[in-house]
Image: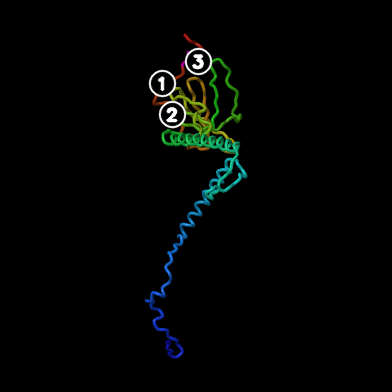
Amino acid sequence: MDDDIGKIKVIPDYFQPSTSEDSSPPNKPPVKSPPRTENCLSYLWRKKRFRSAGFMLNLLNLKGLPWGSGADGQEKVELTAAELESLRAQLADLEEREAHLKAQLEHVDEILRFARLSGYLHIRTRWKPLPGEPPPIDDTDVDDWLPRFVVLHGTCIFFYMVCTDLSPQDSALLSDIVEVDSLPCFIREEDTQYSFYILTRQGLRYECSSASKIQVDSWLTALQADCKSKPDTKPDTKLLNGDHS
């Protein structure tokens, strides 16, 4: 029986657990709600996986592919035999490109780690006139400078088209270099260009230029040191005069 204390209604033992067996709820198996975090992560993972798959298929130029559902309820792509063959060919091409890019990166890494000197220079070549030939015409104003990635490694100088090329376009042995010296500065595309030349015993002259004086001085110092440290390698005057005796 409820007791009234003023205007407050008191229900005795309301907050105490009931000891009656009849009042206990019927036994039901506990229902465990799946963790919300796991559900979210699983959903995001599936969404990311299908999105990545769709991105790769779009990357392979297979647009508007029909998506369907498999027996297990998971999404799948249905391809014809021609589309499958095209996909395989493109995957093979991507693997080949990946291998080539990996080789290029390894090559650049080797250059940066082991080359004594490397960098981009503008290069042009000239042949030294043989005795008796008229002097070459003044071609100072001829703009035939080409950018090349030049590497001083071991006993050679290598000339690459770009730094990622696996094979050099040209090369010269340090033992064949007979002269290295600076050239006058000139203006190219409104910038001052500092230059030097490398002359080989075969008469081939590499003219090199750069807008960086520090870079040109570094090449001159390294190459002139190599020329001074090797034995006398002056060109054979008998050979240049055409005397083969």
Helix, strand, or loop for circle 1? loop
The numbered mark, 1 or 3, whose residue comes first in the sequence reads 1
The numbered mark, 2 or 1, whose residue comes first in the sequence reads 2
Residue at x 47% of width, y 25% of height? 172
Q: CA distance from mark 2 to mark 3?
A: 24 Å
The amino acid on which the numbered mark 3 sits, given as a three-letter code, is: Leu
Q: Which residue is mark 3?
A: 240
Helix, strand, or loop for circle 2? helix
Q: Residue furthest top?
A: 245
Q: Which residue is mark 1?
A: 232
Q: Which residue is mark 2?
A: 224
Q: CA distance from mark 1 to mark 3?
A: 17 Å
Return the x and y of residue 31 as percentages of the image width and height.
45, 63
In the image, residue 131 above or below residue 73: above
Residue at x 55% of width, y 43% of height? 56
The amino acid on which the numbered mark 1 sits, given as a three-letter code, is: Asp
Return the x and y of residue 151 as percentages of the image width and height.
47, 31
Whether residues under marks 1 and 3 lie with C-beta atoms below 8 angstroms apart, the answer is no
Helix, strand, or loop for circle 3? helix
In the image, residue 139 above or below residue 22: above
